Amino acid sequence: MEDLYSLVDWSRAQFALTAMFHWLFVPLTLGLGLIICCMETLYYRSGDVRWKHITKFWANLFGVNFALGVATGIILEFQFGTNWSNYSWFVGDIFGAPLAIEGIMAFFMESTFIAIMFFGWNKVSKGVHLASTWLTVIGASISALWILVANAWMQYPTGMQFNPDTVRNEMVDFFAVLLSPVALNKFFHSVTAGWVLGAVFVIAVSAWFLWKKRETFLAEKSMKVAAWVGFAGILLVSYTGDGSAYQVAEKQPMKLAAMEGIYEGSNGQGLVAFGILNPAKKSYNDAEDPFLFKIEIPRLLSLLATRDADGYVAGIENIIDGGYPVKNAAGEWVTAPSANDRIVEGRAAIQALADYQAATKAGDVAAATDAALRLEQNYPSFGYGYVNDLAQLVPHVPLTFYSFHIMIILGGYFVVLFVVVLLFSYKKMLARYTWLLWVFMLSLPLGYICLEAGWIVAEVGRQPWVIQDIMPTFSAISRIETSAVQTTFWLFAVLFTVLVVAEVGIMLKQIKKGSELK
Amino acid sequence: MENEKLRGSHVISRIFYFYLDGFRSMTTGKTLWTIILIKLFIIFFILKLFFFPDFLNTRYDNDDERAAHVAKELTSVPSEQTPF
């Protein structure tokens, strides 16, 4: 068993490394792309050729990021087939269909229009070029939609039915998968977070130009456009983040409890604005206080999670023990089952699957029918059947908690940042204070930290599940050698490091070169 | 000159010359395309071929065998577990 968990840990680490690396490129493509669209629209509407040069400068940086990031996501799909074969088989076409659509759309839409975007200056009309730029960015955003639909299904499996003959979940309602509230929130939250990163990137690079007293027209104009895009982005991020938190509270209460470090739930639960977790707390049910220090906003978490300031928010212990009021899928208030109840159901589901397989092989129709019925009744807890220690159901609380709070604090910081940039921009004082330019420049890594932290919250917070309640990581894995996964982990680490170094090097060269604007 | 060459020609030729001229006039793009091609080679011809064989496709010939394997994997685990 120890070997299994080592294999699971390495496979998870490899997937996390690849996904986090991929997530360095995607949001900048989405955000910088939108800013370029806005700039080119200004060129189209005003006819001012300076906007054309500004657009081309940022489009070059967009191209560098796009080129270095392209196909890095494919590696994730390789890992599904090699490291996560039980999962790959088990999810069937539900996961495959969105990924296939993404691949086709990405290829046809992005590759067609990005060519016009880069090669089409002075060869196609201004209108066609502008349309191509917009369609490239829309295509990239739609690509993100399909990936996030697949991810959202893992967090909230819906629109499917398990087929015990094929041992696969089969899609029965495409629109339930596509339009699930988790998918929609996740899509808009992720894309608008990309707008924020794109804006922070443009502001940081422009601040460098102002500090160097170069490209001042480009820098000042770019900062204004970026700040508006970033401001719109951060407002939408806040709105969709609130929607995401509400969905998490309903569908993944353990994740919410980990995000806020709540072990004992209550009515009128406060939101931890800032806190330091107690490192002495080693288990969900030991007597240690979870916090060394915290500043809490009274009742706010209840309001956000339940839309009622006195609403009940469960803690980790409550979720393990059950017995608190919770809404079921039909929207009725029921008593939450304990984790042990669900483990019993999960094991019954797994036994029913085994019985069904045996009965089918023996040609015993009655036994197969009975087993299928038991499987269907207990299937919502299928994954709990693999749990042999209740602690496995608790995600890594410090990582989830700190990532969530870093994301929130930086989100608040970006609101202030964009407002400051806009204020100073309209007062034409952007270049006046060197220290402020440094603040703008140093905000760039904060943008990446914020987005990676968001990804950690979403993915670490849902552990141990690869499919919520249905399949934990330790039953999703392929029985391969741990050393094979370790080897490819380090190969990726080297490959990704080289790509990041290349990206930064080429970007810096392009930035130093400046625009064609004289 | 280029536009004159393109004007009046067949749409396929125009698309061809559009791309050809685009690629020819690239500066940083040439470096980027080199990186893309090296990256794709590493991903598809090294990583995929030698390090990431599809676990089920390389071990089993058809879907029935793959389903049987996954069913065995998923139904054999509980017996190994200790009581909670």
Image (cartoon, rainbow, N blue to C red):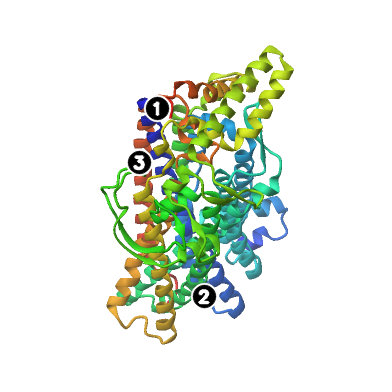
Q: Nearer the viewer, residue A429 or B4?
A: A429
Numbered disc 2: secondary structure: helix
Alpha carbon distance from label 1 to label 3 = 23 Å
Examine the rendering and report whether any part of residue A461 can be seen: no
Q: Amino acid at mark 1?
A: Leu
Residue at the extreme bottom of the image, as rendered: A427
Give the numbered dot on residue A51: 2
Q: Amino acid at mark 3?
A: Ala
Question: Which x, y percent locates residue A140?
Answer: 57, 55
Do the dots labelled 3 and 2 sit on one chain? yes
Numbered disc 1: secondary structure: helix
Closer to the N terminus: mark 3 or mark 2? Answer: 2
Residues packed near mark 2 inside 10 Å, few (<14), some (14 to 19) or many (20 plus): many
Q: State the residue position of label 1.
A: A4
Question: Which x, y percent locates residue A123?
Answer: 62, 64
Q: State the residue position of label 3.
A: A493
Task: Give the residue at x 36% y 44%.
Answer: A284
